[in-house]
């Protein structure tokens, strides 16, 4: 009877565990609990413990894959913004406005003395320069926004690392006294996964149950010693990502951060955006320089020459942001140098024609302005398309990894119903054993 | 592999999202008529469309300038045709007045007629188009021939680009049409004829007849030049129009959605979405031991 009574207690615990599993079927990070039964020496059964059904390999893979997914998603999002800046879904692109300016110049060549045609040229040049400059400003704003996002991400990371450090301590304390630490581990695993979406991380659990988090070739967390992640602007204007360790040591891990949202933000901010900015600067520089070279040789209706159409760029870097119609021409349609000599005034159109024909001529490199801008858009489009594909791939691999983890750690309501029935039947059988023994004892007593 | 409820729900959610994405994309294509709307949706196609847009802008601009230049040349040709008529009339008068049966009084009247014709010729030489004086070269804002009959314009060319790096003149030289640069100073010849008639100088009238013939040939030659240039513009414009059509087709094939294919895709996406919803419903209604 004692054996059966003990067994009833164990089966009741099994029913409790099934109930716990069903209750947490939708709890993120929950690993289903398994009653660990063992045969007692001699006779009977005992509940040796409550285990977490968790495949550590699968769990680690989830963290790795979510890190890659975080990086891909953050980068693709930033690239979508860059794409919208350079190729807005509404309105004209820089390429369209470049074509418009050359077309206006061509129209002026047919009416060099016409004030309206001159005003149209001036307006199109101002629109083009203004759009190039505002596009460059938008790219800078996007970089600033990515810095802020990186810093927000670092703040979230530090908060979660602090929580993991505390949980590590609590788990170690619980393990030391053989108390149940499963719920704490569930919470910690969820937090580690959250960290993994923000920075590439590897989690290693030690004998005390505490995890050590390694990232970017450095230690992010060990036991309850938590390093802080610091994101700031480096001397070159790029992101600087540092781990500040509890002892005061600092690791600059900037170039080693490739995973998680932070990795994606860094890639978009310091690789993709500067590349686009450099191409836009080169475009603005080549366009200004080539147009100015011809325009400066032309004569305005006022008989003056030597005036550039665009403010001459000091250097390639920053040429896009600084682009503007030159002060000597701005607001002065008569200053547009359409004629090649003063003797040709007012009907001379050779210079206007020569500027219009620059639209078909290679400038700077081997490309026409039209081809140069299309190359920028094409390059960005290809990069963004690859990033989008990467996001899809990572979504799928995360789904696979999640399935692998869920396959061992997830709760199946049907399984738990079967377990409930199983434990219930065992409980009833044990009761039956007690009832049978009790009946036998009654019979024995009556026979005495 | 052990399958849990959450795995089934996650898969259902993922599949439904994919179906919804596909439906949204097909809807956008069908409603906008565009298969490619951003560079990342098709970098090569988007680049082709952007290049086509640039080429279209360039060719449209060329088309407009050629049309304007063609109109100017048509006006120049018409003006020169009228000028040649004036010289024919002057020549007829001169031939008539060279006859021995005409007296000084009749020749004096003819001289005044020649003066009117000269005045008409002066107005033709100073004819204006939409971009200024037709025959002043690049001196388009002042009359190329002053009241004294002196040519004060220039012989410069106003070029128009008719193809990549191909520039042709869009103006007829007034100097060649009306001044000694073309062989005869037409206005001076008319003035000389008038003088010969008013002074009853028969020899001068005879010379005037020859001069009118030469001047007429000179103006007709200029008119022919205007016609040839006009034809060249019309021919180039026709080629440009064809090129615009070709580019428009190429652009359409690069980025525009085929309406039939777009509708078909939309129908398929709609069916797939409906099926996804139906399958999700079926999976959600699967019996569970929890309900037993």
Image (cartoon, grey):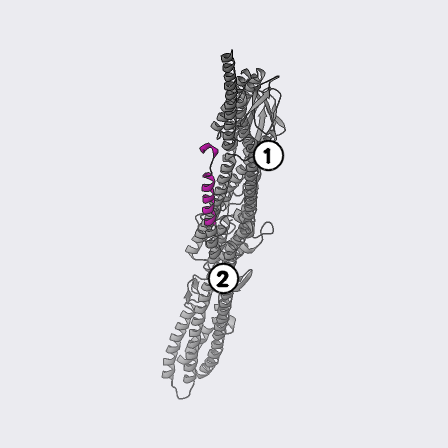
Give the main secondary structure of the magenta stretch.
helix
Question: CA separation, marks 2 and 1?
Answer: 49 Å
* Number of the label disc, if any, that sits on residue B117: none
Residue B88 appears anywhere in the view: yes
For disc 2, the marked residue is: B245
Q: Chain of mark 2?
A: B
Q: What is the x, y in percent for residue B266?
A: 46, 51
Q: Is residue B284 magenta?
A: yes
Assign a secondary structure to mark 1: loop
Nearer to me, A370 or A243 = A243
- Is residue A277 visible in the rendered image? The answer is no
* Frontmost residue, B12 versus A215: B12
Q: In the orientation shown, which residue stands out farthest toward the front?
A: A447
Q: What is the x, y in percent for residue B115?
A: 39, 75
What residue is drawn where x is 61% and y is 26%? A204
Q: Residue furthest right?
A: A217
Question: Mark 2: which secondary structure?
Answer: helix
Region in magenta: B269-292
Label 2 packing within 10 angstroms: few (<14), some (14-19), many (20+): few
Q: Which residue is mark 1?
A: A258
């Amino acid at each position: 009877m004692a054996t059966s009574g003990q067994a009833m207690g164990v089966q009741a615990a099994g029913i409790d565990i099934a109930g716990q599993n069903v209750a947490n079927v939708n709890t993120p990070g929950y690993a289903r609990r398994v009653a660990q039964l063992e045969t007692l020496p001699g006779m009977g059964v005992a509940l040796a413990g409550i285990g977490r059904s968790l495949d550590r390999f699968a769990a680690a893979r989830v963290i790795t894959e979510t890190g890659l997914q975080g990086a891909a998603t953050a980068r693709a999002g930033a690239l979508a913004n860059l794409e919208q800046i350079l190729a807005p879904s509404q309105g004209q692109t820089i390429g369209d406005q470049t074509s418009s300016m050359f077309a206006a110049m061509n129209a002026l060549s047919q009416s060099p003395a016409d004030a309206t045609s001159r005003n149209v040229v001036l307006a199109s040049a101002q629109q083009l320069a203004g759009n190039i400059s505002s596009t460059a400003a938008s790219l800078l704003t996007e970089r600033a926004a990515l810095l802020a996002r990186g810093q927000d991400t670092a703040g979230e990371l530090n908060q979660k690392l602090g929580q993991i450090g505390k949980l590590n301590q609590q788990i170690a304390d619980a393990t030391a006294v053989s108390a149940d630490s499963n719920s704490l581990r569930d919470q910690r695993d969820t937090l580690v996964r959250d960290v993994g979406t923000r920075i590439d991380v590897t989690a290693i659990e030690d004998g005390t149950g505490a995890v050590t988090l390694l990232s970017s070739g450095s230690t992010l967390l060990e036991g309850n010693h938590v390093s802080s992640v610091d994101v700031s602007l480096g001397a070159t204007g790029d992101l600087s990502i540092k781990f500040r360790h509890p002892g005061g040591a600092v690791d600059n891990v900037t170039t080693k951060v490739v995973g998680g949202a932070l990795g994606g933000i860094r890639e978009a901010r310091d690789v993709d955006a500067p590349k686009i900015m450099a191409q836009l600067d080169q475009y603005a520089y080549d366009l200004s320089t080539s147009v100015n070279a011809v325009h400066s040789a032309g004569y305005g209706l006022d008989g003056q020459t030597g005036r550039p159409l665009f403010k001459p760029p000091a250097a390639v870097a920053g040429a896009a942001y600084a682009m503007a119609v030159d002060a000597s021409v701005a607001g002065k349609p008569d200053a547009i140098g359409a004629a090649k000599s003063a003797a040709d005034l007012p009907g001379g159109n050779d210079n206007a024609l020569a500027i219009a024909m620059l639209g078909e001529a290679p400038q700077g490199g081997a490309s026409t302005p039209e081809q140069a801008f299309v190359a920028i858009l094409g390059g960005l489009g290809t990069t963004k398309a690859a990033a989008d594909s990467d996001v899809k791939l990572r979504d799928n691999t995360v789904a696979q990894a999640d399935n692998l983890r869920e396959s061992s750690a997830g709760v199946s309501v049907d399984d738990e119903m079967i377990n409930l029935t199983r434990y219930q039947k065992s409980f009833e059988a044990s009761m039956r054993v007690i009832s049978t023994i009790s009946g036998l004892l009654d019979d024995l007593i009556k026979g005495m | 592999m052990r399958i849990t409820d959450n795995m089934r729900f996650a898969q259902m959610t993922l599949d439904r999202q994919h179906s919804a994405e596909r439906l949204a994309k097909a809807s956008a294509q069908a409603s906008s008529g565009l298969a490619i709307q951003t560079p990342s949706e098709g970098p090569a196609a988007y680049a082709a469309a952007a290049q086509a847009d640039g080429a279209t802008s360039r060719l449209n601009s060329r088309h407009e300038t050629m049309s304007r230049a063609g109109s100017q040349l048509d006006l120049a040709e018409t003006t020169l045709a009228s000028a040649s008529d004036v010289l024919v009339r002057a020549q007829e008068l001169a031939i008539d007045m060279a006859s021995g049966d005409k007296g000084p009084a009749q020749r004096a009247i003819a001289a005044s007629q020649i003066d009117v014709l000269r005045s008409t010729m002066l107005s033709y030489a100073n004819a204006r188009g939409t971009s200024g004086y037709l025959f002043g070269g690049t001196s388009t804002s002042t009359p190329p021939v002053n009241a004294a009959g002196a040519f004060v314009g220039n012989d410069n060319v106003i070029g128009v680009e008719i193809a990549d790096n191909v520039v042709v003149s869009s103006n007829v030289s007034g100097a060649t049409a009306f001044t000694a640069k073309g062989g005869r100073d037409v206005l001076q010849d008319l003035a000389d004829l008038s003088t010969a008639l008013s002074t009853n100088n028969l020899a001068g009238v005879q010379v005037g007849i020859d001069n009118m013939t030469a001047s007429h040939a000179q103006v007709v030659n200029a008119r022919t030049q205007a016609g040839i240039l006009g034809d060249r513009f019309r021919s180039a414009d026709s080629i440009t129009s064809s090129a615009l059509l070709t580019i428009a087709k190429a652009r359409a094939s690069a980025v525009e959605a085929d309406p039939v294919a777009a509708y078909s895709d939309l129908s398929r996406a709609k069916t797939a979405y409906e099926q996804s919803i139906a399958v999700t419903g079926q999976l959600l209604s699967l019996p569970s031991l929890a309900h037993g």
